[in-house]
Image (spheres, rainbow, N blue to C red):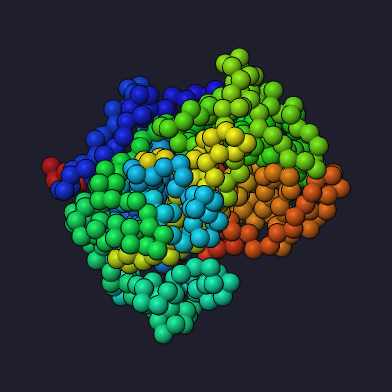
Amino acid sequence: MSMIWRNLVGSAALLALAACNQSTPTPAPEPVLDAQPELDIPAWPHGAMVAAADPRAVQAGLDVLAEGGHAVDAAIAVHAVLGLVEPQSSGLGGGAFMLVYLRESGETLVYDGRETAPAAATSELFIKDGEVMGFLPAWQSGRAVGVPGAVALYKAAHDVHGSSEWARLFAPAIELANEGFEVSPRLGGYLANERLRSVMRLDEPGSAAAAYFYPGDSPVAIGTKLQNPAYAEALSEVAALGPPAFYTGPRAQRIVAAVTEDAEPGAMTLDDLRDYTVELRPPLCGDYRNYTICSAPPPSSGGVTQPAIMGLYERIKGVPAGLNQLRDLGHWVNAQRLAYADRDHYVADPDFVPVPAADLINPDYLDARFQDVGDPARAEPPGDPGAVLARGPMIDLWGRDTTEEGGGTTHISIVDLEGNAVSMTATVESPFGNSVLVDGFLLNNELTDFARDPMKNGLPVANAPAGGKRPRSSMSPSFVFASDGELVMVTGSPGGNSIIAYVSKTLIGVLDWQMSAQEAIDLPNVIARGETVGVETSAPDGEIWAEHLRSEGYQVTERAGENSGLNVIVVREDGLEGGSDRRREGVALALAPPEPERELPAPESDN
């Protein structure tokens, strides 16, 4: 493993950051980072950049950076706006994973703000009358709501890294919520989609969601100026009081009431909210040629899948032989298949089950695993890192799991004026979460990311529900570093379990196919999980790619309307290069580096 492993934070990374255990605000404890040698770090010459899913959110982040704020400060400001203007994707009622890179010290930290199951939850959370609940009934229920982590994550990261005033970070979102914001085509399109409306309960008569999104039983039209004073009030109280304004008191009582008084009630309590903690974890990092790829560890999937896909791709492809996308396409598909199979089988909350995360990206395991590539017409089974690495077979610890995951998610990529970076993926799970609006924000349905059937083939599933457990996530906020430890790339995407494929596409595009950030994002999405290979034929070259894979024996499913929302920043010699997914409404905007201070000539003497 390359020198980037010096970025890991050692034993401190296993500590929980208490976000809100008191009724009055208390700062999250600062992690005790491993001592780093003093380095002569040259000034960051590249300026700053924010890439996110809405221009209004991006501008809020840029304004914070222009004032000298840290990348973490900007991420909070960006996400607070996204929770208002893009409520179908994320918000205060959901959770997130945030990677933070600190250029001066070289550390990379992961703040795990993933939602948790209520303490009273059991493995049979989604078993009703002896039968496994279907996804749609589970999604639209109180059972699906996890304890939200976003607000606690804000405070935990800001207490350690923030340089802007806490309250200032919420001002743009508060102003937009009070004055009103224009409903975007994406939000308006979701609300007007009759198929989606038929399976959600956003328009349930008498509900706060119906009054907000469907006044007069009609969806809010694109371009309408929509006000959300309840959201402004919630943010104002968080700005004044910190997480206790969310996790205790009247707001917490309203969240619990919405969950427990549901027709399919959940078991969330005030204690569950009060006791929520953010986990500080080390990233998982793996090598690809002269680069190191770091992402979030379990219960996220990024740290297992992104280094694995790239490591497997390198081994399957062999010695580079020039650029040839069609030739390399099957190699990438095979690498995805192997990594997805391992992820589906092993990844879960490591605080509850043993997860062989480091073994799954161990070079010795990848050396063996890439040779498992088989019939292109059949799904790949999971590998057994325990057997390969002589730790003892482990494949039969768990039943096979192919849990589906929704796509109500967003991603933020940021580099600040000091060269610090944030890669943050946030979610409420499926579009509009569980469709219940409380105080201007939607509650998540994140617990449907657990395996609803806790047993497979007579064996327990690693990702089965349990009290206090965090469901497995596909979120893959990622950094790429050069061999000298300098930042090369910030990337991530929404998109349910397809996130893994979406993010790996940008790594392949930029690092192997030598494309720009935007060119890599614009490539057709290819998702190779299981027997079939999904190819986005509505994208340029998508039909060519699909036909080529068919000619190689793969079972191809043609897909349109992919749910990716990639936001990418690449560090080039002459500055920052950004890209934002045209499939959504995002932008990537830059700040020029500050002008160097000029020395004034000494005044002439009168003598």
Q: Is residue 398 visible?
A: yes
Residue farthest top in this picture: 390
Q: Is residue 68 left or right of residue 292?
A: left
Residue 531 image offset from top left, x and y in percent: 73, 45
Q: Residue at x 74, y 58 (%)?
A: 558
Residue 38 or 199: which is nearer the viewer? 199
Residue 175 image offset from top left, x and y in percent: 29, 69
Residue 499 or 105: which is nearer the viewer? 499
Q: Is residue 576 visible?
A: no
Q: Is residue 592 left or right of residue 67?
A: right
Quadrant where the N terminus lies?
Answer: top right
Q: Is residue 589 left or right of residue 399?
A: left
Q: Residue at x 52, y 49 (%)?
A: 130
Q: Is 27 drawn above or below residue 312 in the view shown? A: below
Q: Is 489 drawn above or below residue 202 in the view shown? A: above
Residue farthest right in this picture: 551
Q: Residue at x 24, y 35 (%)?
A: 29
Residue farthest front in this picture: 129
Q: Is residue 604 left or right of residue 109?
A: left
Residue 239 image offset from top left, x and y in percent: 23, 57
Q: Residue at x 72, y 36 (%)?
A: 380
Residue 31 image offset from top left, x and y in percent: 29, 31
Quadrant where the C terminus lies?
Answer: top left
Residue 434 picture quarter:
bottom left
Residue farthest left in this picture: 607
